[in-house]
Amino acid sequence: MPDPKLEAAYRATDYHVTGAPNGRFVIRVGEMCVDLEELLFDEVEFDWAYLTACNPGSVRLTAEENDRRTAELREVLNSRWPRRYEGFSAASDGAWQEPSFLVLGIDEAEAVGLGRRFGQNAIVAGRIAEPARLVWVE
């Protein structure tokens, strides 16, 4: 069972997408996102995940280390999932943010595997016509 405070923090996070062709939008756990639905329809995709490589295990790293990890994740995504869009995860109170990616065409098992590879506690994932879900990696 995940730590209730950690789970509440993930659920309160805003998952921003800044680089999508249909403009900027925000994904929230437990909610539908009309802009995400439109993007999935336009790109003819069904599955998606929102991933980061920063601050593994919710332990803050230096900006340089997070930048290195983000570049590594970007390279992995480019090799298999070219339909990925830049963004950032941010606390709803603005206390922190970290670079992240919305990835289209990635199934949940693959996304969990990447989350595990980059030491993440959880990812956000979903399918077309369903609300965003918080998925624990371990």
Image (spheres, rainbow, N blue to C red):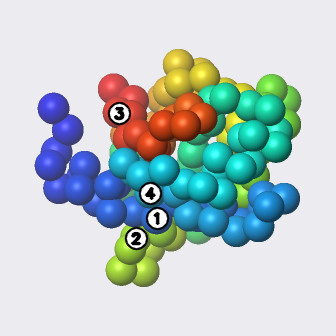
Mark nearest the camera among 2 and 1 is 1
Please give the residue where the numbered disc 4 appears in the rendered image. 28
Asked whether the beta carbons under mark 1 and mark 3 sit within 8 Å of each other, the answer is no
Above or below residue 27? Residue 131 is above
Mark nearest the camera among 1 and 3 is 1
Please give the residue where the numbered disc 3 appears in the rendered image. 136
Q: What element carries label 4?
A: loop
| Residue 74 position within the rendered picture, expressed as x and y whole percent measured from the top left | 75, 45
Q: Is residue 90 left or right of residue 20?
A: left
Compare marks 4 and 1 and give the one earlier in the sequence: 1
Compare marks 1 and 3 and give the one earlier in the sequence: 1
Q: In this view, does 87 lie to the left or right of 91?
A: right
Locate the C terminus by quadrant: top left
Please give the residue where the numbered disc 1 appears in the rendered image. 14
Q: Can residue 5 be seen in the rendering of this structure? A: yes
Name the residue located 17 percent from the left edge and 56 percent from the top edge: 5
In 3D space, how far apart are the residues under numbered discs 4 and 3 (Cα atoms)? 16 Å
In 3D space, how far apart are the residues under numbered discs 4 and 1 (Cα atoms)? 6 Å
Q: What residue type is labelled 4?
A: Arg
Q: Can residue 67 be seen in the rendering of this structure? A: no
Asked whether the beta carbons under mark 4 and mark 1 sit within 8 Å of each other, the answer is yes
**Dot 1, crowdedness within 10 Å: few (<14), some or many (≥20)?**
many
Asked whether the beta carbons under mark 2 and mark 4 sit within 8 Å of each other, the answer is no
Q: Which amino acid does label 1 sit on?
A: Asp
